[in-house]
Image (cartoon, helix red, strand yellow):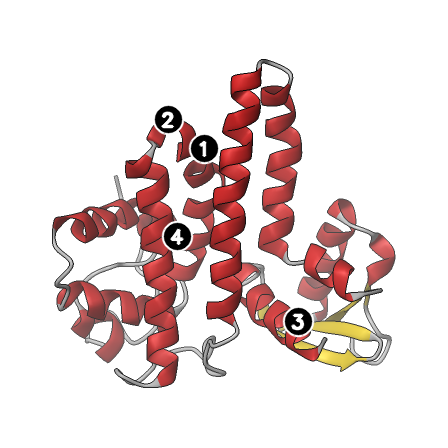
């Protein structure tokens, strides 16, 4: 039970990294199961609570009177905990809204939906294992894992998984799986690019990569996602060591084009 909560907290910290004023998500208690989302101000906390209540059970999200900069999320059971993983919830909404149309068209569409759902489930299972191994300092500004450390290997495996997601949706069977990339994976990976520790391992791998052309194509595919999220994806010395032109952890300025 506590392992489920810890995985949820880590994944929520990544999913909500771009929320205004979001600091982190931690486990408040295991009995009852409660997660706490911390923000830098009361206004940002209340804004987050309002947005979550619009798409979920409003009773689950409460702000304690003595901690106005925090939003507590209450859960009923391990099953409901898993349902509340933000990225899974987003995909289930995609399945419900988009696949319902496919299912009504033909038996072929039904098979396509099943194939997409199976692919997604396989990748989610792999992600859950990797996320449970993420380092504790994952979201600390300017921090990056030492090459060869357990945290570095966990982040490397995350990018291995992202590569597999890109390859399956863009190369393996683009006609069948491309909607998953456009509606889901590209957004999740784009958010990961804004996190310094994730980006450093990716850039280091790209600089020393030995995988050949397919991985280089994957790297090229990430460039538009980096630009959309206002970050530079380039040489290791620029992002992980810091430079006079762009201090450590600072986002790149948007293009004037």
Label 1–label 3 contact, CB within 8 A: no
Q: Which disc is residue 175 wearing?
A: 2
Q: Which disc is residue 4 wearing?
A: 3
Q: Nearer the viewer, mark 1 or mark 4?
A: 1
**Pointer 2 local density, CA inside 10 Å: few below 14, some 14–19, many at least 20:** few
How far across and how far down the image is residue 29, in percent?
77, 81
Q: In terms of secondary structure, where does tag 2 sit?
A: helix
Label 1–label 4 contact, CB within 8 A: no
State the residue at coordinates (68%, 73%).
Answer: 5
Mark closest to the chain's N terminus, 2 or 3: 3
State the residue at coordinates (71%, 51%).
Answer: 51
**Pointer 4 local density, CA inside 10 Å: few below 14, some 14–19, many at least 20:** some
Which residue is tagged 1? 179
Residue 47, by quadrant, is bottom right
Q: Nearer the viewer, mark 4 or mark 3?
A: 3
How far across and how far down the image is residue 55, in percent?
74, 46
How far across and how far down the image is residue 32, in percent?
84, 76
Q: Quadrant of the C terminus?
A: top left
- Mark 2 and mark 3: Cα distance apart in space: 35 Å
Residue 243, by quadrant, is bottom left
- Mark 2 and mark 4: Cα distance apart in space: 27 Å
């Amino acid at each position: 039970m506590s392992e489920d909560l810890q995985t949820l907290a880590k994944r929520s910290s990544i999913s909500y990294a771009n929320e205004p004023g979001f600091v982190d998500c931690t486990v408040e208690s295991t009995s009852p199961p409660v997660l706490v989302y911390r923000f830098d101000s009361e206004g940002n906390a209340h804004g987050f609570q309002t947005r979550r209540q619009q798409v979920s059970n409003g009773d689950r999200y409460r702000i304690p009177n003595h901690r106005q900069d925090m939003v507590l999320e209450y859960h009923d059971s391990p099953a409901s905990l898993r349902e509340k993983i933000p990225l899974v919830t987003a995909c289930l909404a995609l399945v419900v809204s988009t696949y319902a149309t496919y299912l009504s068209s033909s038996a072929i569409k039904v098979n396509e939906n099943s194939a997409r759902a199976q692919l997604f489930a396989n990748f989610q299972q792999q992600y859950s294992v990797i996320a449970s191994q993420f380092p504790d300092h994952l979201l600390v500004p300017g921090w990056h894992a030492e090459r060869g450390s357990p945290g570095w290997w966990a982040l490397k495996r995350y990018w291995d998984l992202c590569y597999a997601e890109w390859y399956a949706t863009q190369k393996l069977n683009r006609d069948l799986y491309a909607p998953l990339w456009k509606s889901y994976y590209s957004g999740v990976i784009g958010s990961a690019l804004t996190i310094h520790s994730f980006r450093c391992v990716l850039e280091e791998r790209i600089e020393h990569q030995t995988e050949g052309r397919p991985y280089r194509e994957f790297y090229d595919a990430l460039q538009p996602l980096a630009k959309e999220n206002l970050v530079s994806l380039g040489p290791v010395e620029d992002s992980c060591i810091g430079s006079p032109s762009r201090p450590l952890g600072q986002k790149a300025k948007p293009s004037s084009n």
